[in-house]
Image (tube, rainbow, N blue to C red):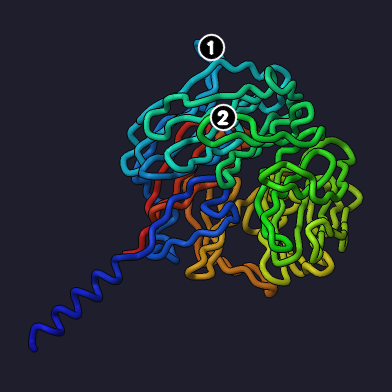
């Protein structure tokens, strides 16, 4: 009987250490929704700078890393001795390079030539990579071997948009879906295993926003933001279910993914402001609840997001406006509830990436200065708990002042991973 307290202590210790750990295998996390589910992570930092577990050399690129099965994936671009894009894999524990897949790639007239935009999507032992000018690969995730490949320009007559193809591939059941901007194939779906085309849809020019899957009227719907409209497609066939026109007044610059909450769907872009849709009880029903757009990028209304995909929580929306203003909106009307100017740079294209930590309700924000912030969001305001430096800004992504850190971080296995134009870093977030 005397041994029981000691045994109980051991059991409690084992239970405490059996905290949940997850991968981050695609754009914005496991659910593509910017939600982080791991437990056993810190709520305060040890100091003003995060201690790196490791760092690895990479070249320039905008794509955020993804993490799956003990490996970290990222893409970059090199110009010497020849112009190439690369898909890189590293050991998640040590940062040791595992493999590189490089291919010749001429960016031509694409603006902001630093490197690829779309994060690698990893699923069931395969890594799916979409390059800036339409090179689409399915790679063996462990070895980097090419299993199949597509060329959007050669095979689909894709017209590459001003800033290149940017939307991360989306896995849906036995399909991988990509926004490639082809003729009659703004979006296309391929068999995960064989690469066989299963469907192609729409003759729209592409945008930069990654598609998502939602539940609507008892069915799964692929929501995509093209260059001219927001659409709902049947993900199995590519058939158009509903559409909402949303022309861009200057040029296509929709980067942030749409976000859904219940029967509402919200989108925001730099020049055209924000739109709120309500999805009806029938699959083909959609209505515009409101659209708010300011006079210009300085005199904005509601929210004019650039890269920051907003957070839609209950009756409120949180996002970053055109010049770095962190804002809260009423979802019902688009009216501004508050504005914060402390979280990110107050300059054109000041940016945050916002991730909600589900177990604690904290929000983790990574800004364009390379800082990681922990805080709380509510209609009452942004309450910062702590912040620490993760990365130094670099000038490849944007040659401004000291540069920027625009890539979206990955949160996996109680660590954070991110990159600039020179290095990929890993830092521990595990609680003691």
Front one among 48 and 235: 235
Mark 2: give few (<14), some (14-19) or many (20+) Cα within 10 Å: some
Residue furthest top as drawn: 81
Total label count? 2
Q: How far across and how far down the image is residue 156, in percent?
A: 72, 23
Residue furthest left as drawn: 2
Q: How far across and how far down the image is residue 70, in percent?
A: 36, 43
Quickly name the residue at label 1. Answer: 82
Quickly name the residue at label 2. Answer: 195
Q: Is residue 7 above or below residue 164?
A: below
Residue in view at x 86 percent, y 46 percent:
246
Give the secondary structure at mark 1: loop
Mark 1: give few (<14), some (14-19) or many (20+) Cα within 10 Å: few
Residue in view at x 65 percent, y 38 percent:
167
Earlier along the polypeptide chain: callout 1 or callout 2?
A: 1
* Distance from Cα at disc 1 to Cα at disc 2: 28 Å
Disc marking residue 122: none
Front one among 187 and 161: 187
Question: Residue 130 appears in which quarter of the rendering?
Answer: top right
Image quadrant in which the N terminus is located: bottom left
Give the secondary structure at mark 2: loop
Q: How far across and how far down the image is residue 181, in percent?
A: 74, 30
Question: Residue 378 appears in which quarter of the rendering?
Answer: bottom right
């Amino acid at each position: 009987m005397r041994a029981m307290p000691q045994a109980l202590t051991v059991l409690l210790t084992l239970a405490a250490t059996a905290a949940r750990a997850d991968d981050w295998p695609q754009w914005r996390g496991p659910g593509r929704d910017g939600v982080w589910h791991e437990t056993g992570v810190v709520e305060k930092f040890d100091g003003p700078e995060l201690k790196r577990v490791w760092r690895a050399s990479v070249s320039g690129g905008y794509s955020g890393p993804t993490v799956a099965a003990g490996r970290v994936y990222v893409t970059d671009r090199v110009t010497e001795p020849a112009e190439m894009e690369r898909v890189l894999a590293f050991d998640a524990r040590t940062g040791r390079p595992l493999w590189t897949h490089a291919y010749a790639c001429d960016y031509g007239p694409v603006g902001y030539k630093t490197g690829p935009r779309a994060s690698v999507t990893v699923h069931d032992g395969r890594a799916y990579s979409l390059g800036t000018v339409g090179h689409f690969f399915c790679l063996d995730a462990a070895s980097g071997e090419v299993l199949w490949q597509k060329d959007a320009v050669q095979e689909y007559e894709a017209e590459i948009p001003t800033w290149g193809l940017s939307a991360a591939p989306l896995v849906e059941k036995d399909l991988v879906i990509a926004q490639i901007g082809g003729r009659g194939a703004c979006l296309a779906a391929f068999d995960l295993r064989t690469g066989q085309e299963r469907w192609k849809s729409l003759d729209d020019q592409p945008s930069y926003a990654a598609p998502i899957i939602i539940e609507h009227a008892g069915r799964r719907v692929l929501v995509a933001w093209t260059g001219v409209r927001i659409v709902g497609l049947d993900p199995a066939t590519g058939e158009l279910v509903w559409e909402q026109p949303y022309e861009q007044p200057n040029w296509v610059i929709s980067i942030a993914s749409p976000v859904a909450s219940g029967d509402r769907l919200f989108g925001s872009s730099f020049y055209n402001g924000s739109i709120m849709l309500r999805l009806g009880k029938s699959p083909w029903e959609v209505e515009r609840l409101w659209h708010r757009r300011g006079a210009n990028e300085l005199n904005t209304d509601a929210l004019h997001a650039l890269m920051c995909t907003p957070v839609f929580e209950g009756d409120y929306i949180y996002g970053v406006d055109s010049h770095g203003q962190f804002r809260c909106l009423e979802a019902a009307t688009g009216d501004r509830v508050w504005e914060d100017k402390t979280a990110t740079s107050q300059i054109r294209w000041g940016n945050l990436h916002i991730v909600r930590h589900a177990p604690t309700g904290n929000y983790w924000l990574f800004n364009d200065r390379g800082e990681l912030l922990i805080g709380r969001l509510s209609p009452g305001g942004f309450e910062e708990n702590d912040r620490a430096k993760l990365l130094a800004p670099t000038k490849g992504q944007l040659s401004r002042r000291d540069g920027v850190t625009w890539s979206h971080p990955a949160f996996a296995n109680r660590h954070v991973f991110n990159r600039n134009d020179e290095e990929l870093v890993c830092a521990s977030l595990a609680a003691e």
